[in-house]
């Protein structure tokens, strides 16, 4: 998704709706945009229509942003995988961001900073209450709201005794990967600091290992570090719920970090490894 000039966009929305009449219905096309410099017609990319609605709602200080889609709202899990999954009535902005498959994540930000709730409804089942997303859920006693997953995960482990207590190793890891255009969506470091595991997409694993081996070639040659260890064909599972951090015993297998617990598991379920931003790593 292209970067948005927030100041200019806000100005243009205000000018367009300066004579807003609450008794009228305004139909606004989403997705389509204009390049600030060339003035050529472009688009906002995937999720651009929802994003357009969110931007306008935020600028106009709307009471609520309604997103009409083809499902009843956010589900506790993928119903194609978990048959007993059901619709979640209410979510916080943070929880919705973690579970975001129904609406595109950038849609949440503009209204979140204005504390404008989001209502997700089903066009084909308008009677269903859907999911309400807001800043704080009252009387929320559920520690876990849902489970999300990412297929095609590779776990790359950077390890070596020379890493212990050395400042800048992780900076080198992330700078090297960023320069190659490789996104890291999960990080785990041992408490001893002698290893760091990162999660990348399967299609990026080979390139990531190659550039990291090149970056640490001197340390690998002297035996201070080991060549990159790559495990592919994994799935990333996110257990989501803001109340997990206040509920003892939730993270019996992996460690609970703030709003989410992340761990990596093989599709065959024979091996399990915890990969969180804390120092817990487990195997059966």
Image (cartoon, rainbow, N blue to C red):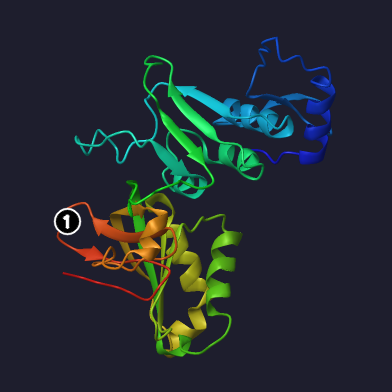
Residue 283 figure quarter: bottom left
The percent position of residue 261, horizontal first and vertical second, equals: 36, 60
Most distant residue in the front direction: 139
Residue sitting nearer the eye, 26 or 272? 26
Query: Compared to 164, does 190 lie above or below?
Result: above
The percent position of residue 258, horizontal first and vertical second, equals: 44, 63
Residue 25 figure quarter: top right
Residue sitting nearer the eye, 187 or 249? 249
Quadrant position of the C terminus in the picture = bottom left
- Residue lying at 58% horizontally and 29% vertically, measured from the top left: 65
Most distant residue in the top direction: 24
Q: Residue 200, can we see it? A: no
Which secondary structure lies at badge 1? loop
- Residue lying at 69% horizontally and 28% vertically, measured from the top left: 56
Quadrant position of the N terminus in the picture = top right
Q: Is residue 8 rendered to the left or right of residue 184?
A: right
The percent position of residue 123, horizontal first and vertical second, equals: 43, 16
Residue sitting nearer the eye, 92 or 279? 92
Q: Residue 8, can we see it? A: yes
- Residue lying at 66% horizontally and 29% vertically, measured from the top left: 62
The percent position of residue 277, horizontal first and vertical second, equals: 43, 69
Residue corresponding to mark 1:
269
């Amino acid at each position: 998704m292209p970067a948005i000039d927030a100041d200019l966009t806000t100005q243009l929305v205000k000018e367009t709706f300066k004579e807003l009449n609450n008794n009228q219905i305004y139909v606004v096309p989403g997705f389509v945009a204009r390049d600030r410099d060339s003035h050529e017609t472009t688009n906002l990319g995937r999720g651009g229509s929802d994003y357009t609605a969110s931007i306008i709602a935020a600028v106009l200080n709307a009471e609520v942003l309604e997103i009409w889609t083809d499902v009843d709202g956010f589900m506790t899990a993928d119903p194609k995988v978990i048959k007993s999954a059901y619709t979640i009535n209410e979510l916080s902005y943070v929880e919705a961001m973690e579970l975001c498959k129904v609406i595109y994540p950038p849609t949440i930000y503009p209204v979140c900073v204005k504390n404008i709730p989001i209502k997700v409804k089903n066009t084909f089942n308008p009677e269903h209450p859907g999911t309400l997303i807001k800043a704080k859920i009252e009387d929320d006693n559920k520690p876990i709201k849902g489970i999300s997953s990412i297929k095609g995960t590779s776990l790359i482990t950077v390890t070596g005794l020379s890493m212990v207590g050395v400042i800048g190793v992780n900076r080198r890891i992330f700078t090297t990967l960023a320069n190659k255009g490789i996104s890291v969506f999960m990080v785990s470091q041992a408490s001893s600091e002698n290893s760091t595991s990162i999660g990348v997409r399967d299609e990026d694993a080979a390139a990531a290992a190659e550039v990291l081996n090149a970056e640490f070639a001197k340390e690998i040659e002297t035996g201070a570090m080991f060549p990159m260890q790559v495990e592919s064909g994994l799935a990333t599972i996110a257990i989501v719920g803001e109340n997990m951090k206040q509920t003892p015993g939730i993270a019996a297998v992996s460690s609970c970090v703030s709003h989410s617990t992340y761990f990596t598991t093989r599709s065959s379920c024979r091996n399990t490894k915890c990969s969180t931003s804390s120092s817990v790593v487990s195997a059966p």
